[in-house]
Amino acid sequence: MNLAAAIAIAAGAISIYVGLVARRFALAPGWGEQRWFGYIAFGTGAYAFGNLATSLGWPDAAVVALSRLQLAAVLFQVWAWFRYVDAWTGHRPGRLERAAVALLLALALLALIPGVAFQDVVEGRSHAWLSSNYREALPTAAGELLFALAAGTALVVFLRLLRTWRSGLAHGLLHALSFGGLLLLGVNDALVTSHLYPGAYLLDVGFVIPIGAMAYSLTQRFVNDARSLRALRDRLEGLVEVRTGELAEAQEALHQSEKLAALGQFASGVAHEVNNPASVVTSSLSYLEQWCATGSWPPDAQETVVDALAAMQRINGLVRRLVDAGRLAAVPDAGGSSSIQAVIEQVVDEARARSGERVVFRLEGTPGLYAGHRPEVLAQILSALLHNAAESIPEGRDGHVVVRTDRVEDGRVQLAVRDDGVGMTAELQRRAFEPFFTTKGEGKGSGLGLPVARALAESRGGALRLESRPGEGTTAFLELPEVSPPHDLHAVSDAPPGPAPLRAR
């Protein structure tokens, strides 16, 4: 191993490494031109490793073969430089220019053919200060022409790089200076080859100069892009924070608007429900007042008072239901639990008493379930569901209401109240939970049962929905969070799951 061979190995290894790095960078968006720079680096590595044959005393055949490889690598590099400068500057060459550049690849392949660029003659040359003996293949006339062509086209690349510097392109001067140094060392090798002075071959080192310069440019560009990305990320984070605040304010404003709209709808419903019976009371009192002014009572005074009292009872009933619902919702959740079957049996007894023998109630499903609602709240919800289910069955025929309990996913239990009544249209299902909406006749329903039941269910993490088809009945699905039985519950029912009829009456 001599100094010349060590330089060749070092130059080749550095070039191959930089080429691999450039190829990896080329995969990033906006860095596609690095693909061509990778080709430049690989060509440099091939040229540098080719010098090993001339400096390590390899056989003549190896010297000639690697000399052909070095000339092909030079032509390949010049082609890659043209492609790199075009990609870097955004230049789009015309058809003639593309053909001329592609000709360099054809000439590189031509240089690899034995006997075209080099003779099969090798001569030696000694360089004492490098402690090495060069053994060179003699070029043919065609080989000298190819060297001249490579030098001329490389000069064109240098002029284009100078233009990039003058146009203000980043790192344009660095590209031009490094490539200019390469050309100077190429002139040195040409003079050595012509025996004009006994110098050393330095082109393999010269090829590394632009590789090193481009590696610095690549690193600097990466740093600049990283800084720009960090600044962009900071700006985006600031914008996201501002937009998040604005969105939160908009959502709060929308929430307030929705609450005001709901309050307005609720107030309108209350006013409508109170207005009718209040009008009856007002009319009755005015009628009685007119007769009192004459000092006598009208013949229908008792009927008038009865109507006024009935109207007041409707108002009192509405107020009582609103107060009861508000009281149940306002009581803090103490983390209690309710035996679902016990509450259902209690509510079904009350519903059966109201409906009589024409409606049969059954309980099915899984026994021993507990819900995270207080018993009075769960009873209020189920009472509204059973009341609606029973009243959906037309007069004049018997009906059935089935209450089924099951465990569902996410630690919840489901109560399904299914009836075989008249069912509901899609429009009725859409409006079923509107406050004060009812399909019952005047004075027969307040329209608060389902809205209050849903509100009470949702206030404790539950949900209530309806499924129905006209003529096929309705099913109300109530989902509640399941809890464990109370700790003081010593006995657990061993009844198997499945249909379990309630107490018959």
Image: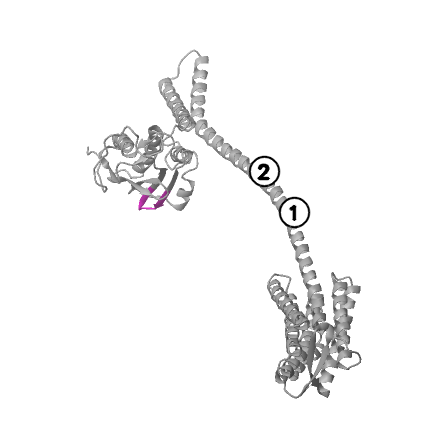
Residue 249 is tagged as 2
Residue 270 versus residue 163: which sits nearer the camera?
163
Q: Amino acid at mark 2?
A: Glu
Please, is residue 397 above or below residue 63 in the view? above
Q: In which image quadrant can residue 410 be found?
A: top left
| Residue lying farthest to the top in this orientation | 295
Residue 482: x %, y % from top left: 34, 37
- Tell whether 300 sits left or right of 33: left
Circles 2 and 1 in contact, beta carbons < 8 Å: no
Q: Which residues are magenta?
A: 466-475
* Residue 319 is a magenta residue: no
Is 264 situated above or below 152?
above
The x, y position of residue 290, in whole percent, is 45, 16
Residue 200, compared with residue 457, is above or below; it is below
Magenta span: chief secondary structure: strand
Give the labeled residue for mark 1: 235
The quadrant in which residue 239 appears is: top right
Whole-percent x, y for residue 416 in the image: 31, 41
Nearer the observer: mark 2 or 1; the answer is 1
Residue located at (23% from left, 34% from top): 492
Q: Is 469 colored magenta in this rendering?
A: yes
Name the mark on residue 116: none
Residue at 66%, 83% (x, y): give it: 111
Mark 2 or 1, nearer chain start: 1
Secondary element under disc 2, as helix, strand or loop, is helix
Mark 1 belongs to which amino acid? Answer: Arg
**Left or right side of 241 for 371:** left
Q: CA distance from mark 2 to mark 1?
A: 21 Å
Q: Nearer the viewer, residue 377 or 473?
A: 377
**Secondary-structure class at tag 1:** helix
